Image (cartoon, grey):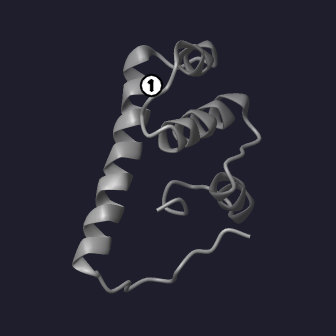
Amino acid sequence: MARFAGLSEIQIDAALKGSAKEAKDAAALKFANVIAEKRGRINDANFKAVTDAGFTPGEAGEIVAHVALNVFTNYFNNVAATEIDFPVVTVG
């Protein structure tokens, strides 16, 4: 999907590792990681960091929704023992 969005291999690799060259992109990735690590129990400083980076509260909510959707999808596929029909991605 990242390739379809126009990301280069370098950008994709960096994103998989939770980093990005652009400060706003890096803030979004960090926020997403915090949400996942803290299982949604972020604090005010976490929210402030992403909004200070230029995201609106609504956009921060969209990041939360994407994390939640990915967690849900992973859980569902684990329970269903879904066969992976695309190349598996490993993080270096």
* Side of 66 relative to 76 (left or right): right
Residue 88 position, x and y percent, is 52, 80
Count of numbered circles in the view: 1
Image point (55%, 15%), residue name: 51
Q: Nearer the viewer, residue 50 or 12?
A: 50
Helix, strand or loop at label 1? It is helix
Residue 67 position, x and y percent, is 41, 44
Residue 56 position, x and y percent, is 46, 15
Image point (50%, 83%), residue name: 87
The image quadrant that residue 72 belongs to is bottom left
| Residue at the disc numbered 1 | 60
The image quadrant that residue 66 belongs to is top left
Q: Nearer the viewer, residue 11 or 28?
A: 28
Work out whether 30 lies above or below 55: below
Residue 53 position, x and y percent, is 63, 19
Crowding near the residue tagged with mark 1, few <14, some 14–19, many ≥20 C-alpha atoms within 10 Å: some
Work out whether 31 lies above or below 16: above
The image quadrant that residue 59 belongs to is top left
Image point (54%, 43%), residue name: 37
Image point (32%, 73%), residue name: 78
* Side of 37 relative to 81 (left or right): right
Q: Which three-letter amino acid code belongs to the residue tagged 1?
A: Ala
Q: Quadrant of the C terminus?
A: bottom right
